[in-house]
Amino acid sequence: MKTLDLNETNEFTEKGMKRFFLVQDSPYFKIINFNLRAGHTFPVHSHDIDGDLSILVLEGNGFFLGADDAEIPAQKDQILVSAIREPHGVRAETDMRILVTIAPPI
C-alpha cells in the first residue's frame, strides 16, 4: 500500500496546464493529476481501446466536454465516468485541478 498527497501537486504554470503522473501506474490503472489555469481547455479526444476513465474535480469549476460540442457543468467533488473510446475533455472557468483515473492504463 502507499499514500499520495495531492497537496504536493498543487502547481500551475502560465502555459495553462501542469500535469503530474502520480506514483500509480500499473498494468491495471493509471492516476494522473492535471492542473488547468482559468480559461484553458484540455481538448476533447478519445482513445481507440476498451476501458473506462473517470475525471474527478478536486478544485475549481468549468465544464466536462464531449462529442458534438457537449458541455456538462463541472465543479469540485463532481466526477465524470466514461468509456475511454467516448470523446472527453475539460474546460476550466476558474483555476481547476482534476484527477483522471484510466483503466486499463494508456
Image (tube, helix red, strand yellow):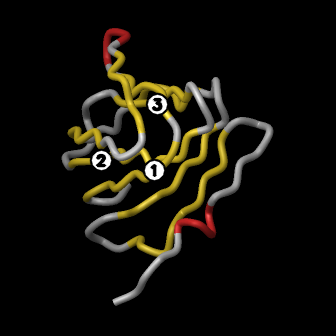
Q: Position of residue 16 (x, y in %)?
A: 70, 36
With respect to residue 20, does 95 lie above or below? above
Instruction: Give the distance between the C-alpha atoms of the residues marked 2 and 3, in whole angstroms.
Output: 12 Å
Q: Which amino acid, mark 1?
A: Leu
Q: Position of residue 23 (x, y in %)?
A: 49, 75
Instruction: Give the distance between the C-alpha atoms of the residues marked 3 and 1, in whole angstroms.
Output: 13 Å
With respect to residue 38, does 76 lie above or below? below
With respect to residue 71, does 51 lie above or below? below
Mark 3 vs mark 1: in front? 1
Q: Where does label 2 land, which residue?
A: 54
Q: Which amino acid, mark 2?
A: Ser
Q: Secondary structure at mark 1?
A: strand
Q: Earlier in the sequence, mark 3 or mark 1?
A: 1
Residue at the image position 64 percent from the left and 24 percent from the top: 39
**Quarter in which the C terminus is drawn:** bottom left
Mark 2 vs mark 1: in front? 1
Within 10 Å of disc 3 (Cα), the crowding (few <14, some 14-19, many 20+) is: many
**Quarter in which the N terminus is drawn:** bottom left
Q: Where does label 3 land, which residue?
A: 90
Q: Where does label 1 land, which residue?
A: 58
